[in-house]
Image (spheres, grey):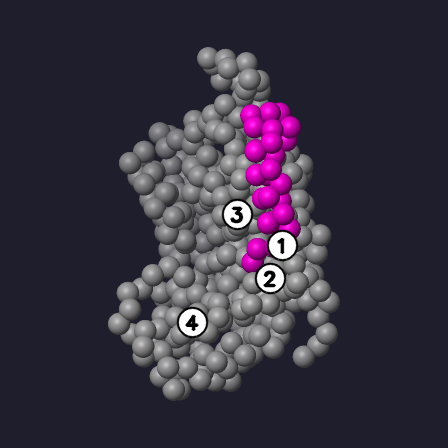
Amino acid sequence: MQADPLLRWRPEFPISERTTYLVSNSLGAMPTRARARMAAHLDQWDERGVRSWAEGWWVAHDEIARPLERILGVDANTVSMHQNVAVASQMILSCFDFSGPRRKIVLLDSEFPSLLYLYESQRARGAEIVRVPADASGVGVDLERLLAAIDERTLLVPISHALFRSAFVQDARAVAERARQVGAFLILDVFQSVGTVPLRLAEWGVHAAVGGALKFLCGGPGNGFLYVDPGERARLRPSFTGWMAHTDPFAFARTHALREDGWRFLHGTPNVPAIAAGVEGVKIVAEIGVEAIRHKSVRQTALLVARAQHHGFAVHAPLDPAQRGGTVAVRVPHGYEVCQTLLAEDIVVDFRPDAGIRVAPHFYTSDEECVAAIDRMAEIVGSKAYERFLQLERKPG
């Protein structure tokens, strides 16, 4: 195994010293700085009370948005923070209606369920839904088929940059170019790629993007975000809105005057505790640089693929590293039960139906942990050590 300069960050993430933590695609490890930051937040609330709003809470949003904008490859003041991707998606969705001839929404059949539920529900508002199926392998999506589905009747193209089951990475630039060519609006979900795959959203021509700090950004829950291209911003008027989007919120006016910057897409009172918990992880990823993280991720996911194949396991992930995000799903017999066995041994992974056991190393992961996790998976299958979990009800994790 080669020397790994990014492992110098490992002590900053204590869970990596107590477990084999391979689930950053689901929840990134907590940095020690987050605990100190939360303590400072609570101290301020305790000592300053309501004055805390004027002493940093009201603009806390910007402290996490600024490093996010660098990671996303977008201009300053173009990102707004939200509770989660569903809320961020509803915000941008509320800028559109389906009363005209352009009413088609192009989705991926392999999308994350929240997005399928949200956009499918727009049928009641007059939307026509087109779902593009997975390719023959079930791992990815045929680009030409996706591009062909986006036509002059398409209004919205809300798709994931990296698929949650397989980590297949879409060609976002090509999709953005097609959307702009026909007058459609691309909403790119970068939740499974941000922090582990370099993003250049402005350069690619992406109209809007949603995501969160929960996963590879190590920012915990409650830190969803929305990016909107500043060239598109002025023409968009969200109906899902609130006082934070007002040009002068503390005037408590009875009519709305929307801001012109990224705050235009805010709504109610900000989630200050979540921001306090999440900002340090995002800053660390920005400091390391996603290019360096990606270089390591490509090497370690290749190591996982090779080790799984060595044991005769199929992988539900692209074999081409350029199309593979930060996760490798491994198909094994009794995958759910094998996953529970690994978790009981502090090898922290997760299981998803139609994918398998998802293994996601990050910059604080060693190569040895990647090999050991797959080897232990094979031992559990071979010895049937998973049998004690066969009767258990399936739960999140």
Eye-nearest disc, 3 or 1: 1
Q: Which residue is mark 1?
A: 32
Label 2 sits on residue? 14
Q: Are marks 3 and 1 in contact (CB under 8 Å)?
A: no
Task: Determine crowd level at label 1: few under 14, some 14-19, many 20+ residues with C-alpha closer than 10 A.
Answer: some
Question: Which structural element holds mark 4?
Answer: helix
Crowding at dot 2, Cα within 10 Å, few <14 / some 14-19 / many 20+, comes out as few
Disc with the residue nearer the chain's start (1 vs 2)? 2
Badge 1 marks a residue whose secondary structure is: helix
Give the residue pinned by disc 3. 212
Kind of residue sitting beneath label 4: Ala
Position of 97 with respect to 252 (left or right) is: left
Tell which circle, 3 or 2, labels the residue nearer the N-terminal end: 2
Magenta residues? 29-56
Rendered-image quadrant of the N terminus:
bottom right
The amino acid at mark 2 is Pro
Q: Are marks 1 and 2 in contact (CB under 8 Å)?
A: yes
Q: How many marks?
A: 4
Q: Is residue 188 visible?
A: no
Q: Residue furthest bottom?
A: 383
Residue 344: mark: 4
Question: Observer-nearest residue: 272 or 96?
Answer: 272
* Dot 3 alpha-carbon crowd within 10 angstroms: few under 14, some 14 to 19, many 20 or more: many
